[in-house]
Amino acid sequence: MPVISYFFGIYILMYHDNHTPPHFHIEYQGDEALMAIETGEVLQAQYPAKLVKLVREWAQESSL
């Protein structure tokens, strides 16, 4: 899976033609979660609020 960003030990990855809803993958300390692009909702996992906030800010700045 292509890494599209890396910061503070957080990997952001995205498949070209993955299932809906549109999302990207977050990998941190060996755990993986999905985040919906449109809503910023974390799907299929729980991460600390600070980490989710960092990723949401990254997504806004990256204009995903």
Image (tube, rainbow, N blue to C red):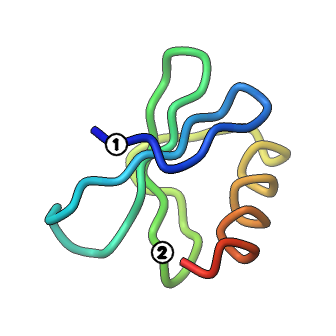
Mark 1 vs mark 2, CA separation in Å: 17 Å
Q: Residue at x 56, y 36 (%)?
A: 11
Query: Which mark sits nearer the N-terminus, 1 or 2?
Result: 1
- Count the marks: 2
Q: Residue at x 41, y 57 (%)?
A: 24
Which quarter of the image is occupied by the N terminus?
top left
Q: Residue at x 49, y 84 (%)?
A: 38
Q: Position of residue 21 (x, y in %)?
A: 28, 75
- Number of other residues with Cα within 10 Å of mark 1, as a class: few under 14, some 14 to 19, many 20 or more: few
Could you tell whether 51 is left or right of 14 in the image? right
Q: Quadrant of residue 2?
A: top left
Q: Amino acid at mark 2?
A: Ile
Q: Residue at x 49, y 23 (%)?
A: 31
The residue under label 2 is 37
Q: Position of residue 26 (x, y in %)?
A: 51, 42
Which quarter of the image is occupied by the C terminus?
bottom right
The residue lying toward the viewer, choosing from 21 and 5, is: 5
Q: Amino acid at mark 1?
A: Pro
Q: Quadrant of residue 23?
A: bottom left
Mark toward the viewer: 1 or 2: 1
Secondary element at tag 1: loop
Q: Position of residue 59 (x, y in %)?
A: 65, 68
Could you tell whether 57 is left or right of 29 in the image? right
The residue under label 1 is 2
List the single residue furthest toward the top.
30
Could you tell whether 41 is left or right of 47 in the image? left
| Relative height, residue 14 to residue 2 (above, below) | below
